[in-house]
Amino acid sequence: MKIWVGSNRSGQLHTEDEALIRAADHGLTVGDGVFETLKAEHGTVFAVTRHLERLTRSARGLGLPDPDLATVRDAIAETVAANDAHELARVRVTYTAGTSPLSSERGGGQPTLIVALAPASPTPDSTRAITVPWVRNERSALAGLKTTSYAENVVALARAKAAGASEALFADTQGRLSEGTGTNVFVVLDGQIKTPALSAGCLAGVTRALVLAWVDAATRAGAAGFPSPPVETDLPFLPTLHSADEIFLTSSIRDVQPVIELDGRKIGEGAVGPVTAAVRDLFRARAAADADPR
Ligand SMILES: Cc1ncc(COP(=O)(O)O)c(C=O)c1O
C-alpha cells in the first residue's frame, strides 16, 4: 500500500512502513485534526468536490488554516493511481494541526496532510443496529465537524459489533435521534422519509445531502415510490426508532443501507422495505451517472 504524507503544500508517496509523521503531531497527541473518508470504486473516487468542501468547513471549525485543496486533490489522485484499483476502497484524507507542544496548546507549524487508501469489504444488502446510552453533544464546539477525535465512536461501534450489529445510534443531549458512529440515519414513518436536522449534532453527511436532494427531485418529478419530499426534523429518539416502518443508514462507504433489526427487534417485516429499496436504487442510478455531483 502506498500512502501520501506531506504538508499543506507538498508531499510524496511512501510505502506503508515509511509513511511516518512526527510523534508530537497534534493530531496524534490530542486529536487536533479533521478528516474525510471517500469511496473509490475501481479507482474512481466519488463526490470529491463535496468532500473537499466539508474538509475546509471542518478545518475552519477547528481554527486550522484552510487546506490547500489543489494539493489535496493531487494527493488523492496520486494515491489512487499508486494503489490497486480495488472494487471498493476507502480513501482517507487526514489533515492535522501538525507538530505542537505536548498539551492542548497548538504550535505554529505546518499542518500535516496524509492520504491513504485501503480496500473495503462490499457493503451487505442490509444490516443490524443498536442504540447506545451515550449521547452526541449538539452544543459541543466540535458538533458537526469531522474531527479525528473519534474515540467515542470507537467505543460505541465496539458495543455494536459485540451485539452482532454493524452500527450504533446516538441520541443528542435533548433525547432527539442524532446519527450513528459513522453514518446518518433516516426513518420512514407513514410513507414519509425523515432524518434528524443538523441541530441534533449529526454530521452533514455527503450521502445524506445527496439522498435529500435526489429524493426531493424525484418527488417533484412525480417518480413512482416517492410520494412526498423528505424532511429534516426533530425526532424523539426511541419513540421514532420503535415506530419506524423502515430505517436506513447512509455513508460514503455504505451508500444507502437498510436496517432490518434494531436492538434485536425486527424493523417492519424484517426485510428491506419498499421506500428504502426505492431510495437505494435511486441513489445507485444517480451516483453512477455522475461521479462528482455538486
Ligand atoms: C459521525 C458520522 N456521521 C455521518 C457520516 C456519514 O457521512 P458521509 O455520507 O459524508 O460519509 C459519517 C461518515 O463517516 C460519520 O463519521
Image (tube, helix red, strand yellow):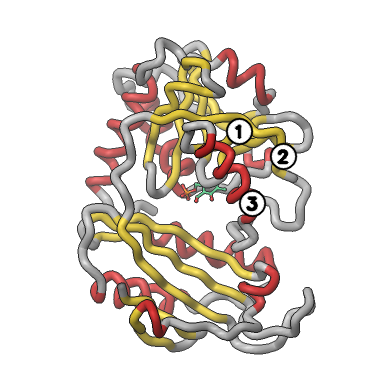
Quick check: marks 3 and 1 in contact, CB under 8 Å? no
Please name which of the two marks, 2 or 3, marks the residue nearer to the observer: 2
In the displayed structure, would residue 190 be above or below residue 22?
above
Q: Name the image quarter holding residue 250.
A: top left
To which quarter of the image does residue 76 belong?
A: bottom left
Q: Which residue is mark 2?
A: 135
> Could you say which quadrant of the image residue 11 lies in?
bottom left
Three-letter code for the amino acid on which mark 1 is drawn: Pro
Residue 154 horizontal/vertical position (percent): 58, 50
Question: Is the C-beta separation of discs 1 and 2 under 8 Å?
Answer: no
Which x, y percent locates residue 69?
Answer: 46, 74
Q: Earlier in the sequence, mark 1 or mark 2?
A: 2
**Lower position in the chain sequence, tag 2 or tag 3:** 2
Residue marked by disc 3 = 144
Q: Which mark is residue 196?
A: 1
Q: Is ligand 1 less than 8 Å from the beta carbon at label 2?
A: no
| Rendering coords of residue 24 (x, y %) | 65, 83
- Look at 53% across and 60% down and name the residue there: 54
Give the answer, above or below, for where 98 lies relative to 226: below
Q: Residues within 10 Å of mark 3 (few under 14, many from 20)?
A: many
- Residue 8 visible: no
Q: Secondary structure at mark 3?
A: loop
Gap in angstroms between the C-alphas marked 1 and 2: 14 Å
Residue type indicated by callout 3: Gly
Instruction: Tell me which label, 3 or 1, sits earlier in the chain.
Output: 3
Q: How many marks?
A: 3
Residue at point 71% right, 33% down? 133
Residue at left offset 65%, top offset 67%: 31
